[in-house]
Image: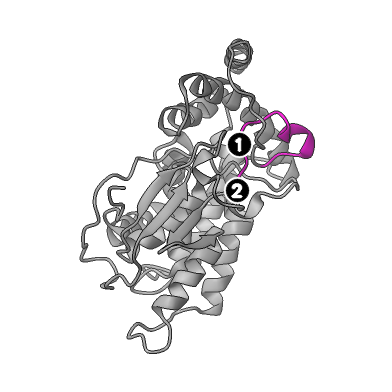
Amino acid sequence: MNRLTSLAALRRAAAAASLTPTRSLQQTAPFTTSSTSQRLPWRLGDHFGSASSNRIAGTMFFSVAAATSLCQEAKAKEPIQSMFKDVVLYQYEACPFCNKVKAFLDYYNIPYKVVEVNPISKKEIKWSEYKKVPILTVEGELMVNSSDIIDTLYKRMHSEGSTHSSVNTEEEKKWLGWVDNHLVHVLSPNIYRSAGEALESFDYIANHGNFGFMERIMAKYAGATAMYFVSKKLKKKYNITDERESLYQAAETWVDALKDRPFLGGSKPNLADLAVFGVLRPIRNLQSGRDMVEHTRIGEWYSRMEKMVGESCRVAA
């Protein structure tokens, strides 16, 4: 009865929001089928921006504390003098793939500026033919797709003549693929598992995204309502019978992969460690993230990663 009452409240709020004059919301929402995508307001950045049904709520399903501190050297981080100048990240604050890139930049002490993109108008990336995030520019050079961005930067850091050795093992590649092809798919059904959890996530998005006032109202109520029902379709699509159990199993699978090592990379994180951490970091303070840490063994690894990644290297624009 409580769930039905909450859903009814969401429907009423969404209906009220839709009656308020505002710009038309035509962008595609993540993890949608073609029929659903015409009604939801966000197009996913990164790998899942095609017209297929494999679209993930990159701008939607995460809540993350804003990274505002200037870059600081942290003892746990890689002691690398940044070779990259004038780095600018075009992002959605809550996008998992944007957070994956930020985890890499933070860990390797690469200072970067952030441009928050309005997911409706996308006016901040009008100049680019590529209309998804993350977009990274390095001294004006355009880089897109989180995995490609990280791979490009990593190879340049470990190019011929560099004093830093490359660690790009088959194990590392396997788990990098696991992040994009499995881990992200269990998140949306968990984050939007109930009406209350959907509103919890969208409350952050509405207040921290680059929205106008009326867009925030639509984002919170209409978005939460839509994604609650979309998540149920995703649960069926990916053969998930129990949302939390699927999340717990993914967390345990990752911990098992560590084989009692502090990190998959051994004594230090490798790219797979950074990818898993980056994708999970935005949900840490959502109910799903709290449950995951409470009911699985991933908490100790996650705490080690927080210390290793250290302070944000975001600098004032």
Residue range in magenta is: 31-44
Visible in this render: residue 277?
no
Numbered mark located on residue 267 in the image: none
Q: Residues within 10 Å of mark 2 (few under 14, many from 20)?
A: many
Taking the view exactly as shown, the residue that stands out farthest to the front is: 127
Q: Residues within 10 Å of mark 1 (few under 14, many from 20)?
A: many
Of the residues tagged 2 and 1, which is closer to the observer? 2
**Residue denoted by label 1:** 42
- Tell me, yes or no, whether the highlighted magenta stretch contains residue 260: no
Tag 2's secondary structure?
Answer: loop
Three-letter amino acid code at the position of disc 1: Trp
Name above or below for residue 176 compared with residue 224: below
Find residue 250 and report its horizontal and vertical position in percent. Answer: 55, 54
Name above or below for residue 46 compared with residue 212: below
- Could you tell me how far apart the alpha carbons at marks 2 and 1 are, in whole angstroms? 12 Å
Find residue 272 and report its horizontal and vertical position in percent. Answer: 48, 66
Q: Which residue appears at 57% of the width and 38% of the height?
A: 190
Q: Nearer the viewer, residue 225 or 267?
A: 225
Numbered mark located on residue 131 in the image: 2
